[in-house]
Amino acid sequence: MPALDKSTTMTEAIAQIGDGARVMIGGFGVPGTPFCLIEELVRHGPKGLTIIKNDANEAAMGVDWLLAAGMVKRLITSHIGLNANAIRMMNAGEVEVEFVAQGILAERIRIAGAGLKGFVSDIGMGTLLAEGKQRLEIDGKTYLFEPAIEADFALVHAARADTAGNLVYEATARNFNPLMAMAAECTIAEAETIVPIGVIHPDAVHTPAPFVDHLVALPELPEVYGVVKR
């Protein structure tokens, strides 16, 4: 039996994403953001997307490419303060923005990957973040029900991968990537280095291969990744 190899081209992987898809994008600012996959998604051009990401990146990079191309209908995020274009589009009603406290966002994604429908929390009570949410009374105290966030696709960036799709993230680039890889129906990973199965020690794996559907090699990192070679 031939060895499992999930490697494919970026064009073939991203071509699966159609109009109206829910797309999770890993990263925290620059670290861990799959800029090359986002760039290919812009070239592919599906419309009416729901984008789930911790932030909206800065103007003229990452998520902003999708916003500028008019591809985003809804953005689920913890903040957009570094992106003046995202703020303008929200205020103009050009894109719907759902703000979620950062820890709650991470947990809503993690819960989806665990196969659960949601959890309860008192974070955000008495604030705008609680508006419209279901409330539950437990032991005389009021909590908010936080529904799991699932997606059709997750785009993640890894430092290393093997051909089966086991992923390793570099330092803080780990952030949302492992959670999102578990919470989507289809996970597409870009990797700086791809090695044969067995080269990555099992204890070093951050995202196991069963959560990864497609693997794309990055021959080099464009300047937007902000990596300084020493």
Image: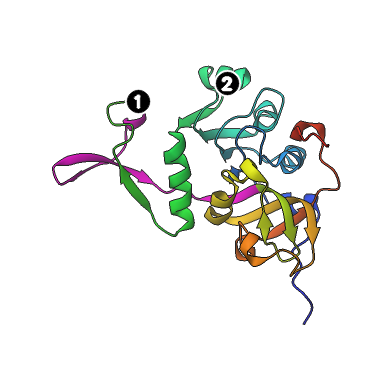
Q: Residue at x 74, y 70 (%)?
A: 198
Instruction: Measuring from the top left, give residue 185's x and y in whole percent.
Output: 57, 57
| Residue 54, image quadrant | top right
Q: Give the left or right position of residue 213, taking residue 183 as reference.
A: right
Q: Residue furthest right?
A: 219
Q: Mark 1 = which residue?
A: 128
Span of residues in magenta: 129-155
Q: CA distance from mark 1 to mark 2?
A: 20 Å
Q: Residue at x 73, y 37 (%)?
A: 42
Indicate the secondary structure of the residue bearing disc 1: helix
Q: Looking at the image, is mark 1 or mark 2 earlier in the sequence?
A: 2
Q: Residue at x 31, y 37 (%)?
A: 133
Q: Look at the image and tell me whether residue 12 can be seen.
A: no
Instruction: Measuring from the top left, give residue 191's x and y in whole percent.
Output: 75, 51
For badge 1, the amino acid type reads Leu
**Badge 1, how many Cα within 10 Å: few under 14, some, many 20+?**
few
Quarter placement of the C terminus: top right
Q: Mark 2 = which residue?
A: 89
**How many marks do you count on the picture?**
2
For badge 2, the amino acid type reads Met
Task: In this rendered view, identify the residue nearer to me: 41 or 182.
Answer: 182
User: Of discs 1 and 2, which sits in the foreground?
Assistant: 1
Is residue 134 highlighted in magenta? yes
| Residue 99, image quadrant | top left
Q: Residue at x 25, y 40 (%)?
A: 143
When the figure is inspected, residue 184 is found, relative to residue 132, above or below; the finding is below
